[in-house]
Image (cartoon, helix red, strand yellow):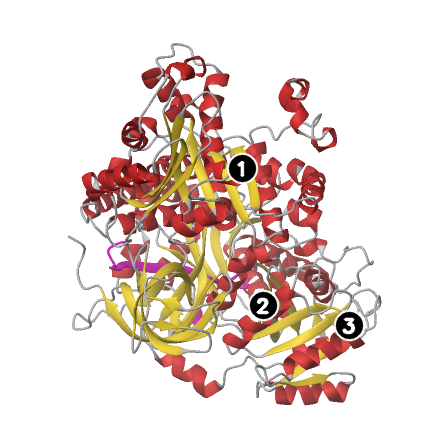
Amino acid sequence: MDAVRASPYGQLFRPDNFVYGQSGAGNNWAKGHYTEGAELVDSVLEVIRKESEGCDCLQGFQLAHSLGGGTGSGMGTLLISKIREEYPDRIMNTFSVVPSPKVSDTVVEPYNATLSIHQLVENTDETFCIDNEALYDICFRTLKLTSPTYGDLNHLVSVTMSGVTTCLRFPGQLNADLRKLAVNMVPFPRLHFFMPGFAPLTAKGCQKYRALTVPELTQQMFDAKNMMTACDPRHGRYLTVAAIFRGQMSMKEVDTQMLNIQNKNSSYFVEWIPNNVKVAVCDIPPRGLKMSATFIGNTTAIQEIFKRISEQFTAMFRRKAFLHWYTGEGMDEMEFTEAESNMNDLVSEYQQYQEATADDEVEFDEEDELQEQQEHGQEQQPEFAKQKIMASFFSLFDPAQSDEVYASDDDDMNNNSNSQSDSDSNSNFSCSPKIEIDFDKGSLPPEPQQGNVEYKLKLISPSKQRFEHLVTQMKWRLREGHGEAIYEIGVSDSGHLHGLADNDMTASLQTLQQMAQKLGASTTVLRRKSLGNRRSVVEVLVRRIPDDQHNIEVRLAVLGGADAGKSTLLGVLTQGEYDNGRGRARLNMFRHMHEIQSGRTSCISHETLGFDAEGNVINYKYNEMMTSEEISDRSTKLVTFMDLAGHRRYLKTTVQALSGYSPHYAMLVVSAVSGFSVMAKEHLSLVRALEMPFFVVITKVDIKSPDDTLQELKNILTSVGCRKVPFVVQSDDDVLTAGSNFSSEKVVPIFCVSNVTGTALNLLTEFLYVLSPGISNAEKERLEQEAGEFQVDEIFRVAGVGNVLGGLLVKGVLTEKMRMQLGPLRDGSFMPVVVRSIHRNRAQCRVVRAGQSASLAFTQNTKLPPLRSGMVLLSDNGNENDSAPYGTYFFQAKVAVLFHATAIYVGFQTTVHIGSIRQTAIIRGIMGGGKIGTNDSASVMFEFVCHPEYVRPGMRVLFREGETKGIGHVTQVFPLNRKFN
């Protein structure tokens, strides 16, 4: 930086526009994006605002950065997103240096690059990809430089950047400024990654000896050796091309040569975009040359660099290598998963448009998938082996029988005896620790302090106080074992096998059974070991798993703009303590360090509020040591809040939650200080589009009177497009009135609360208590009679358990040991799986019914395919006559366009939300006309871009792209009935 300031180039910049003397991000994207970069970004933005205000005509912004480091990738993408927020209608143009393994000097470059591309896809209009590997190849092979310097590399970058921005700086016969380039070069919003090139390529000292003609420039311009990106354009198809010529030349000659090159290489251009070449000519040549040409290609071959980065990313991410450096800065592991998914979607989209003219790539995809599944299966085997090591405490008494006792879950499924003993023994494997034992000494290891194993020498006639203590201890052990605990009777805490006489053992087992009955648990003797002298030691399994949930669950989505006070409100409701006016209450709601620092929610978080039969609140204030499991146990009604992000940047996550989690109601939070913000209006339109009942909470009434916000809110709710009846709740009678009329979906209750003083919070709490689940008993029974369908919203990996799927049971009933069909896979088919265990509200259960959310684990020896959100589990009836389920690429839906700036035509690309499905889709047909616009309805044919999904008629469809929004329902599905050939 000091060298630049002291050089002649330093005179180009204002001295106060330099930011220096600060440490970098240390090759860590998270540092640049969330911590150290976030501290500097405001000062940088202030400089940008100052320069923007001095512009006569602000066309856009240009950023040069590296994707492999920490500062350029992390802070660079953060700066881009901030600029996009403040200047959404200006062009965002980046020159991004892509990492290459041949010239890499940073191990974590795949992480940084993938996270950066994830941001660039959403926040830039034009991204020029420049590859270090390509620059070195040009220096070595074309320029014949034996030891290229950074100056040589930067010279290539500078001539390319100069050529791209020519039309901004000089007049010409045909101009191609940044906006014209974007309009002519970007056929679909996400496909804006360009391959730049330049001709003639010369070393800095040889420019004056170089003289070219227009035909030579045109020929060189399309040569793969002149490209600044290390991917071969001959491996793809050009969607669009731009050529910027500089120097004294004939426009007619330029047109002739460009037409010749197109005709000669027509197979490398997609035929479904006519006139896909943009030409600009400027009479002023670059310094040192008489003429030059800058090439900009939007080619599907660019996917090669994304594939290369994605493969390196996946190799490290599967093993969680170096992940702690990122999560330590406040990042969520889910961000890595989303970035990987977005990268794969981008590759699939480029491949899809390439296959529009050549469909010879499917075979390779299937081979890649087979290889990936084999690798996945190999990863599962160590987990299964590890599970077998975790044998029962049977092996503590007779190791010779441990192999006989052990049986896999599949063996249990095929065994018709279904004895309680076998079932209980199997469950024991998942929770018993691995313990080494020396049988010659006749002892066990000392009693573990943690876990679900308890040693008891004897339990004979305990006092009342001692009995209560034992029950509390058993409850803790059951919680440690997720509903199961192992008791060793006749064993001291040191592990010595004392044993008990028959009478004492019978009395101890009776006491143990009374303790279990107190907690609603059962006891089963697993093993009895005789020690001689008429003494014995007994191993007992204690199990408490409710057959069904005993409480009513209401799912509530919390919406509203950033800084409206959503997380603070939930903190006050669930923690039972008022806020201090500086955000103390919201701290318990945040999951990441950057959320605490910024005060803004970035991901979905779940919190619970319970009520007993009398309507008393059960939250964390009820008992200092209260856990969420205990709140669920003590409550007859449970309200589950989904705290959703209010920032526009996380709008996709918010829409996904509304569509996938199927909340019963929505709570729209509005600040009395900032009023009804733009994002609050956006969330309101989404809730109305989904026909979801909602109520409004106006916060911060202790700072400012809510009168202005109330009036604005009433005007919006009573407008022609909304037609709602606003009802301000001010008393207990109003709560009952609002609750009784809320199900009509016409009345919108409004609460004016303060998280600091507690104003009207009691009314809001009473209203939450009177809310019904939003579905009638008749409808619930009807859904339970249908075949089971479980939609996958989240995927976890738990040590010792394997993959766990979280989601919602849309219909049917799901039980343990139930056979299901999981899919769709890449070819649209489903694979059989067996449900091993079920958890609801962080507690184990045996049954899940329609409308309930749960987490599922599968038998350990099941080799699962690559999992993703949007998959489904379908009940397997075992009837060979029933047709097997299949996914689909194509479906037809009756849709209504809520808003679009112009008209939607065939080929329009959008993001489709159907339940937990979120995928890019293309409109392939519009029935009854060639286009649809705002407030129009039509039957539309959609095609998924990336992979097949399970869709059925009647499912709700929500599609959006930028400001465009539409809603509808599926009318017809065209399932795949065979694998791809």
Give whichever of discs 3 and 1 has the lower sequence position.
1
| Secondary-structure class at tag 3 | loop
Residue 445 in the image: x percent, y percent? 53, 37
Report the front residue among 450 and 468: 450
Near mark 3 (Cα within 10 A), the count class, few <14, some 14-19 or many ≥20, is many
Q: Vertical placement of 78 versus 929: above or below?
A: above
Q: Vertical placement of 664 versus 583: above or below?
A: below
Q: Residue at x 55, y 79 (%)?
A: 773
Q: Which quadrant of the view contains residue 282? A: top left
Is 847 in the magenta? yes
What main secondary structure does the magenta stretch of the protein show?
A: strand
Give whichever of discs 2 and 1 has the lower sequence position.
1
Residue 660 in the image: x percent, y percent? 46, 66
Q: Residue at x 63, y 41 (%)?
A: 34
Near mark 2 (Cα within 10 A), the count class, few <14, some 14-19 or many ≥20, is some
**Labels 3 & 2 near each other (Cβ < 8 A):** no
Q: Which residue is mark 1?
A: 169
- Look at the image and tell me whether residue 544 can be seen: no
Q: Which residue is mark 2?
A: 682
Residue 744 in the image: x percent, y percent? 57, 88
Q: Which residues are magenta?
A: 826-849
Q: Which mark is residue 753?
A: 3
Q: Amino acid at mark 1?
A: Arg
Give whichever of discs 3 and 2 has the lower sequence position.
2
**Labels 2 & 1 near each other (Cβ < 8 A):** no
Q: Amino acid at mark 2?
A: Glu
Report the front residue among 261 and 109: 261
| Secondary-structure class at tag 1 | helix
- CA separation in Å, label 3 and label 1: 56 Å
Is 557 in the magenta? no
Q: Amino acid at mark 3?
A: Val
